[in-house]
């Protein structure tokens, strides 16, 4: 109940914000009868309406994870963002080993299999991508070897 | 016969050793993808698209590879349904109802072989149906103007939202999210940037591959972290594989009927394979009556949903190829592939690129026989694959997704957006909001707006032009019915509960 009411509210606000930003779309001189703004208005309008419907007629609440699990998910997201930034400066092998090891630990909660998975995936995928599919991956940071 | 001449052309393309090899690889990968719980056909095809793209395959080869994966995944989904009571993908849900009890009764091998044969019958009949129906529909599609296309896109969103979800408002929200994202970027008519908030990264719009991989593959990882990879034990072991000839003969009519039902469900835009297997199972259950033993491990209860789901998978290709409107989540992903390859699906595809279309159809026919061979004698091999633990599988999937998306554009921004879509997908699925309409919205948003604007240019701004032809009116009526009718039919069409131990 509460989840859907909040969700409906968020959807409605986002939809209205969407419509508001659509009013800023520059109009061109050579315009067609519909123009650049109408369709976004339409989408925003329908979405806001549905948001209100969800608010008024909410479904039962889903089972949200416990606080600890939410923390684990947050850590995962931060780690993935860091991985995205690390991929170019640090090469493929080291960031991939760390990232997949952490992910594996998050799922299995066991250290040894996670370390093995990290090393195995990092080396295995590198071999697959580099030599099997000929993608231009860099193994290590420049200047190491 | 036109069809035969075209088919000959198709086989000319498909029987080249390279294409044949791609079909075999695709079938193999597809069966694995389908069998692994947590890696459904949409996920699997989505993470493979960027990789295929970077391999530099030409259009026909890429299409053959990915549709073989698609067909293979439909076969593979049954393996974990029967052995683990976990559907490998959504359409395979109905197979758990009788497949798992049958496996528990010591007939796992029989159930796997029977469902493999049923999959073959369904997929083969559907491919033949596709061969005859698609050119016909392509001819009708020539009559479609912008207002008809607008109504057709609306129909796809309405049926997808109406039939495939439990809550219409939430499905509509999902469609709007997708359509709203599609508006980001340059306006096709005026060339002005829209809703980019001054960001250069957003000028080209949001790449649908980024959204697909994020919403499907990355979100799945979050689900596994949440559950810590539970629910993934090997359920039933099986020793020997025999061919249950008697069961196959006894369920021959079931397979045929289920294939027809599934094919029709698949052709409906937006409905897809899940509906196909559901309708096939329910209709066979009512034909068999209470004495049929459905739900307790009846062989016909295994054959019906498998034939239905594979037939629907083939049927879903009909609207995707002829009209550019996908009939299911996975065909939406295949549509994304076509768009990436710069192929515009639609009636002109049949006239202008017959080698692509007929090469694809011929490869699907070949793929079916390859899949039958893989899924009956070699089924043991794929059962081994189920033993890959999720703590190896999911990190692997994530890393492949990252490399795939990164190799497409080489930008951090896309990777960050992909993670964002992953989080969004997790939250939305928690709230029971379907994510397939988002993909459909991103894929079709610009086409839908273009057809609306073109229709208005033609009519000089008269909105009644949208309802000016009988085809358009028919599509509007179907769209409204497709959205509203399930509200009243839902109590009648309750899904049977999965069996719990």
Image (cartoon, rainbow, N blue to C red):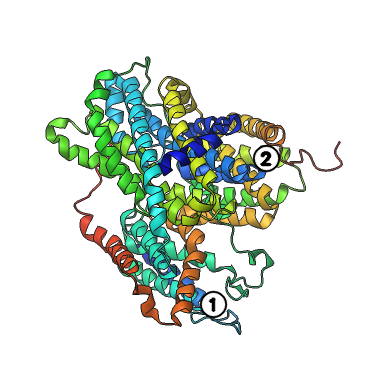
Q: Which residue occupies the foreground of this view, B186 or A141?
A: B186
Q: Which residue is mark 2?
A: A96
**Subunit of mark 2?**
A
Q: Secondary structure at mark 2?
A: helix
How far across and down, in percent of the image, does residue B333 sit? 50, 49
Query: In the image, which disc is placed on residue A36?
Result: 1
Side of B251 relative to B426 (left or right): left
Q: Is residue B409 above or below residue B390?
A: below
**Residue B427 appears in the figure:** yes
How far across and down, in percent of the image, does residue B59 sit? 59, 45
Q: Which residue occupies the foreground of this view, B81 or B325?
A: B325
Q: Which residue occupies the foreground of this view, A58 or B164?
A: B164
| Badge 2: residue crowd in 10 Å (few <14, some 14–19, many ≥20) | many
Side of A22 relative to B137 (left or right): right
The residue at 35%/52% (across/down) is: B271
Q: Quadrant of the N terminus of chain B?
A: top left
The residue at 38%/77% (across/down) is: B465
- Which residue of the protein is positioned furthest toward the bottom in this rendering? A29
How far across and down, in percent of the image, does residue B452 sit? 45, 72
* Total tally of numbered discs in the picture: 2
| Badge 1: residue crowd in 10 Å (few <14, some 14–19, many ≥20) | many
Q: Secondary structure at mark 1?
A: loop
Q: Quadrant of the C terminus of chain B?
A: top left
| Disc number lying in front (1 or 2) | 1
Q: Is residue B29 above or below residue B210?
A: above
- Choose top left, top right, bottom left or bottom right for residue B138: bottom left
**Residue B431 appears in the figure:** no
């Amino acid at each position: 109940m509460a989840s859907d009411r909040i969700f409906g509210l968020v959807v409605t606000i986002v939809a209205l914000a969407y419509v508001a930003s659509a009013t800023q779309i520059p109009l061109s001189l050579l315009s067609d009868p519909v123009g650049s703004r109408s369709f976004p208005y339409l989408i925003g309008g329908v979405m806001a309406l549905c948001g209100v419907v969800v608010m008024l007629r909410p479904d039962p609440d889903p089972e949200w994870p416990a606080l600890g699990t939410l923390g684990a998910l947050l850590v995962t997201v931060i780690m993935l963002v860091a991985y995205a930034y690390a991929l170019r400066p640090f090469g493929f092998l080291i960031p991939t080993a760390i990232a997949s090891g952490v992910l594996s630990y998050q799922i299995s909660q066991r250290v040894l299999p996670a370390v093995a998975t990290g090393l195995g995936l990092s080396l295995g995928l590198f071999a697959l991508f580099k030599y099997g599919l000929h993608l231009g991956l860099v193994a290590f940071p420049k200047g190491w070897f | 016969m036109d069809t035969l001449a075209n088919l000959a052309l198709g086989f000319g393309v498909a029987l080249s050793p390279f294409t044949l090899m791609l079909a075999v690889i695709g079938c193999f990968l597809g069966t694995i993808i389908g069998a692994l719980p947590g890696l459904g056909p949409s996920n699997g095809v989505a993470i493979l698209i960027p990789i295929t793209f970077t391999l530099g395959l030409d259009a026909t080869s890429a299409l053959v590879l990915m549709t073989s994966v698609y067909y293979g995944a439909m076969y593979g989904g049954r393996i974990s349904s029967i052995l683990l009571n976990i559907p490998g993908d959504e359409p395979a849900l109905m197979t758990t109802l009788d497949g798992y009890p049958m496996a528990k009764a010591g007939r796992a091998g029989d159930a796997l072989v029977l469902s493999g044969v049923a999959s073959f019958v369904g997929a083969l009949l559907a491919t033949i149906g596709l061969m005859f129906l698609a050119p016909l529909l392509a001819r009708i599609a020539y009559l479609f103007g912008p207002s008809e296309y607008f109504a057709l896109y609306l129909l796809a969103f309405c049926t997808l939202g109406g039939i495939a979800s439990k809550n219409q408002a939430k499905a509509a929200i999902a469609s709007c999210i997708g359509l709203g994202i599609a508006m980001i970027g340059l306006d096709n008519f005026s060339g002005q940037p829209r809703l980019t908030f001054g960001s250069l990264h957003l000028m080209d719009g949001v790449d649908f591959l980024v959204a697909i991989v994020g919403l499907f593959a990355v979100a799945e990882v979050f689900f596994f972290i949440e559950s810590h990879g539970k629910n993934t034990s090997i359920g039933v072991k099986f020793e020997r594989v025999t061919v249950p000839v008697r069961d196959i003969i006894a369920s021959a009519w079931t397979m045929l009927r289920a294939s027809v039902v599934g094919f029709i469900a698949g052709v409906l835009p937006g409905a897809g394979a899940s509906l196909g297997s559901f309708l096939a199972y329910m209709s066979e259950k009512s034909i068999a009556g209470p004495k049929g033993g459905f739900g307790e491990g009846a062989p016909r209860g295994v054959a019906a949903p498998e034939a239905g789901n594979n037939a629907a998978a083939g049927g879903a290709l009909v609207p995707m190829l002829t009209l550019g409107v996908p009939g299911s989540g996975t065909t939406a992903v295949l549509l994304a592939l076509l768009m990436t390859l710069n192929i515009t699906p639609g009636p002109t595809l049949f006239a202008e690129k017959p080698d692509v279309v007929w090469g694809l159809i011929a490869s699907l026919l070949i793929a079916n026989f390859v899949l039958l061979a893989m899924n009956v004698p070699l089924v043991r091999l794929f059962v081994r694959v189920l033993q890959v633990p999720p703590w190896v599988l999911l990190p692997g999937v994530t890393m492949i997704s990252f490399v795939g998306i990164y190799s497409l554009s080489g930008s951090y921004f896309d990777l960050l957006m992909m993670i964002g879509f992953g989080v969004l997908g997790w939250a939305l699925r928690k709230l029971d909001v379907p994510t397939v309409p988002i993909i459909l919205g991103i894929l079709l948003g610009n086409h839908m707006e273009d057809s609306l604007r073109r229709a208005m240019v033609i009519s000089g701004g008269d909105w009644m032009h949208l309802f000016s032809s009988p085809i358009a009116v028919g599509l509007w009526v179907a769209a409204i019915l497709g959205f509203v009718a399930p509200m009243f039919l839902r109590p009648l069409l309750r899904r049977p509960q999965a069996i719990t131990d």
